[in-house]
Image (cartoon, grey):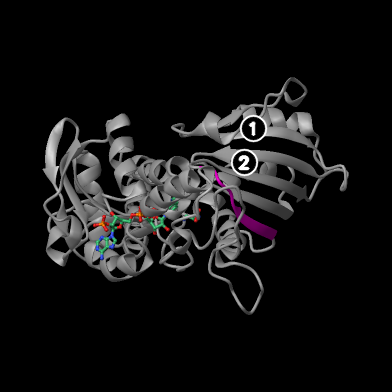
């Protein structure tokens, strides 16, 4: 009979072998090799697709500000922009036209060029070994692609099956950051009513230029230009101009908030009632939220929880005129929250006002934070 110490050693060895076999069955070896190689070297060849656009250009700035370790930048846009130059980390770079070869040797690829480009090229980049972080709606509801806001669900983004992680729509991102502590304090969220006031930069670089010109036209009393690009007159006006979903009567922009919120919290029981409006503001999306949780909430507790949350700034002294406005948040990475109060029409419920820079936290910053959270 073996002595007890040896019996224990054999048992431990056998347990180790079993655990290893089980882990091996769970782990995708190629992805594991990717993470081992790059997490250990911590210096990346980074492609930005859509680098000449509103979001792509800002991804470069956020990578610089956060000193993300970029060994080599591969700036990519359409053939129209090929050969243009831009500056990144003090050096001049030449924009390349999108083609499968641009992803050769790329470790990390940010996509910000629209859904059809992402659908075609993100899988190619991932196949070539890059970790893809996509700003479009192409993969947001794909069950094999995590939809990530680091303050809420970074863990869900580890080891993505297809090598693609989706960034949520800007209006969803700022909302779920504010909802996170409310979800925890209230033992889950039953319902959210959300009205958005979305800035024109959410429609991209050309829309920004069209809106500036249209505002000048209208101020001069001339006929507004750019009505095709802006889908109407936005200067001195409000529009609901996103793609309509005929079956439901909602806009696709609104339905994104319904489905993305459930996926990010991993809770299909959350009911979201959205209404999206484009406002004549250059940057900074604002949202009114009315939230009902499983347990009634005290506004003071919600204020305290939000104030102690990383990535949130509470600006809430309404009696003194203090509440977040788009001009307060442009250029900032945090989500700003004010007007935290009990819902007068639904006691125990909470209402709040949430404002964020849609190009930063709504897109570029969130994308870079995902990369930081997973790779650094
Ligand atoms: P944008 O300003 O219009 O920029 C579009 C970019 O895509 C440009 O760099 C453009 O390059 C490039 N592009 C267009 N066609 C291309 C092609 N065939 N091949 C390669 N590149 C091409 O748009 P954006 O506002 O930055 O939005 C980019 C993506 O982010 C969209 O999917 C959008 O829904 C999403 N998003 C935007 C926001 C926001 O607040 N703006 C927020 C969240 C998510 P050229 O200059 O060469 O045409
Ligand atoms: C918008 N949410 O503001 C969109 C941008 N992805 O139009």
User: In the image shown, does 151 or 362 lie closer to the viewer?
Assistant: 362
Q: Quadrant of ligand 1?
A: bottom left
- Residue 235 in view of the camera: yes
Disc 2 element? helix
Q: Quadrant of residue 246?
A: bottom right
Q: Quadrant of residue 22?
A: bottom left
SS assignment for the magenta stretch, majority: strand
Whether label 2 lies within 8 Å of ligand 2 gets the answer no
| Residue 118 point in image, percent of width and height | 32, 65
Q: Is residue 178 above or below residue 113?
A: above
Seen from this angle, which residue lies furthest bottom? 247
Residue bearing mark 2: 178
Left or right of 76? Residue 113 is: right
Q: Is residue 112 above or below residue 72?
A: below
Work out which quarter of the rendered image holds the N terminus and state it: bottom left
Left or right of 249? Residue 309 is: left
Give the spatial CA distance, label 1 vs label 2: 7 Å
Work out which quarter of the rendered image holds the C terminus and state it: top left
Seen from this angle, which residue lies furthest front? 221
| Residue 354 point in image, percent of width and height | 63, 40
Residue bearing mark 1: 306
The part of the chain drawn in magenta is: 271-281
| Residue 7 point in image, percent of width and height | 36, 50
Q: Is residue 291 above or below residue 80?
A: above
Q: Is residue 25 above or below residue 94?
A: below
Whether label 1 lies within 8 Å of ligand 1 gets the answer no
Residues at badges 1 and 2 in contact (C-beta under 8 Å)?
yes
Q: Which mark is drawn over residue 215?
A: none
Dot 1 surroundings within 10 Å: few (below 14), some, or many (20 or more)? many
């Amino acid at each position: 009979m073996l002595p007890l110490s040896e019996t224990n050693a054999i048992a431990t060895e056998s347990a180790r072998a079993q655990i290893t076999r089980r882990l091996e069955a769970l782990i995708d070896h190629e992805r594991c090799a990717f993470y081992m190689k790059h997490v250990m070297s911590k210096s990346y060849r980074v492609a930005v697709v859509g680098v000449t656009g509103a979001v792509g250009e800002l991804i470069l700035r956020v990578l610089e500000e956060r000193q993300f370790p970029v060994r080599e930048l591969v700036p990519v846009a359409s053939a129209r922009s090929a050969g243009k130059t831009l500056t990144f980390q003090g050096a001049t770079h030449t924009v390349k036209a999108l083609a499968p070869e641009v992803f050769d040797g790329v470790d990390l690829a940010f996509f910000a060029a629209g859904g059809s480009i992402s659908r075609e090229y993100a899988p190619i980049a991932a196949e070539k070994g890059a970790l893809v972080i996509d700003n479009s709606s192409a993969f947001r509801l794909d069950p094999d692609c995590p939809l990530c806001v680091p303050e809420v669900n970074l863990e869900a983004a580890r080891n993505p099956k297809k090598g693609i992680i989706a960034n949520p729509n800007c209006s969803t991102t700022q909302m779920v950051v504010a909802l996170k502590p409310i979800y925890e304090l209230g033992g889950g969220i039953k319902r959210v009513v959300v009205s958005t006031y979305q800035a024109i930069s959410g429609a991209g670089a050309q829309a920004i230029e069209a809106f500036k010109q249209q505002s000048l036209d209208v101020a001069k009393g001339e006929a507004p230009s750019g009505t095709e690009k802006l889908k109407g007159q936005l200067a001195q006006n409000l529009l609901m101009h996103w793609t309509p979903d005929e079956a439901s009567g909602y806009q696709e922009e609104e339905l994104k908030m319904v489905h993305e919120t459930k996926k990010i919290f991993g809770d299909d029981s959350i009911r979201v009632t959205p209404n999206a409006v484009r406002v004549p503001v250059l940057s900074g999306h604002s949202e009114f939220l009315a939230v009902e949780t499983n347990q009634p909430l005290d506004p003071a507790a919600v204020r305290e929880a939000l104030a102690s949350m990383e990535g949130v700034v509470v600006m809430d002294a309404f009696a003194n005129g203090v509440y977040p406005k788009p001009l307060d948040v442009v250029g900032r990475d945090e989500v700003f929250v004010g007007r935290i109060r009990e819902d007068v029409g639904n006691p125990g419920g909470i209402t709040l006002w949430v404002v964020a820079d849609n190009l930063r936290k709504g897109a570029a910053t969130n994308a870079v934070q995902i990369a930081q959270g997973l790779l650094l």
